[in-house]
Amino acid sequence: MRSLSNYQVSDRLPSREWVPSNVQIRQYAEASGDFNPIHLDDNYARQVGLGGMIAHGMLTMAQMAAMLSEWIGKEGRISKLDVRFEQVVRPGDTIRFGGSVSARSGNIIVCDLEALNVKEERVLTGLTHIIQQ
Amino acid sequence: MIGKGFIGRESESVVLKIKMEEVRRFADAIGIPFEGEVPVTYIGTLLQPNIPGFDLTNPGMIHGEQKISYQRQLLVGDTLTFKSVIKDVYERTSKLGKMLFVVLETTGYDLAGDLVFSSSSTLITPTKGDVDEESV
């Protein structure tokens, strides 16, 4: 596997694909304690104008963090993860997570992040700081 | 209705231990192997503060932004004291109409009193024009 030390500015990070299911969203509600009905009740989500159930933003963010953890392994740790939820993610959507190195300073690697749906719409954008250990 | 007057409102401090079985359940739910490390977004499970008058399950409230910073790695077995405060409340008009933005900041300290993490959540609610303009 390519070492973190070899990543330079503008290099792409290994990507990750994810398809949330209703089962996973319910599991996440139970594990996180976030039972907001917009994630669990399709009728409710329609009534409040969301057009149907949506995945928790924090579940989508967790998938981005998982992509980063897979990439850095034991060579680094995430010291900062900032994201913006740009579009809703629904059960059954295929989401592709990716990113690239935007800066390196000492033992810190700064990366720009994004997640796209199959329509190539950005559902999440953000940045992370990885501390190489 | 929440307005600018809510800025500065705090939750009580809560002391919580990071438990192996809860972190494992969280890792299972997000679909990653659990190898003893606490996933970065696990602290999201702590961010449901009891702030008087502020309800995270307001109809249609969605999550706009989330920022998490760690001063050090959070470990299973750590005991944290955490607290949330409403940092900002403002209104914006988007293509979907008037929206109310609430910025909630949460910090977690270890038993030595050192900051472990800070988190900022921006929560968005459609106002449908029923907000008292002067209160926002």
Image (cartoon, rainbow, N blue to C red):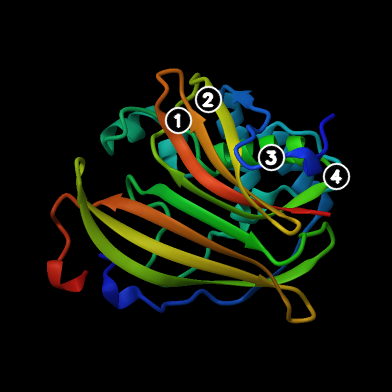
Which residue is identified by label 2? A95
**In the displayed structure image, the side of residue B92 where residue A13 appears, left or right:** right
How far apart marks 2 and 4 lie (CA) works out to 26 Å
As shown in the figure, which amino acid type bears the numbered disc 4?
Lys
Q: How far across and down, in percent of the image, does residue A87 sit?
A: 38, 35
Front label number (3 vs 2): 3
Label 1 chain ID = A
How far apart marks 4 and 3 lie (CA) works out to 11 Å
Which residue is identified by label 1? A89
Q: Residue visible at 76% across and 60% down?
A: B74
Nearest to N terminus: mark 3 or mark 1: 3
Nearest to N terminus: mark 3 or mark 2: 3
**In the displayed structure image, the side of residue B41 where residue B67 appears, left or right:** left
Contact between labelled residues 1 and 4, with CB atoms less than 8 Å apart = no
Tag 1's secondary structure?
loop
Label 4 chain ID = A
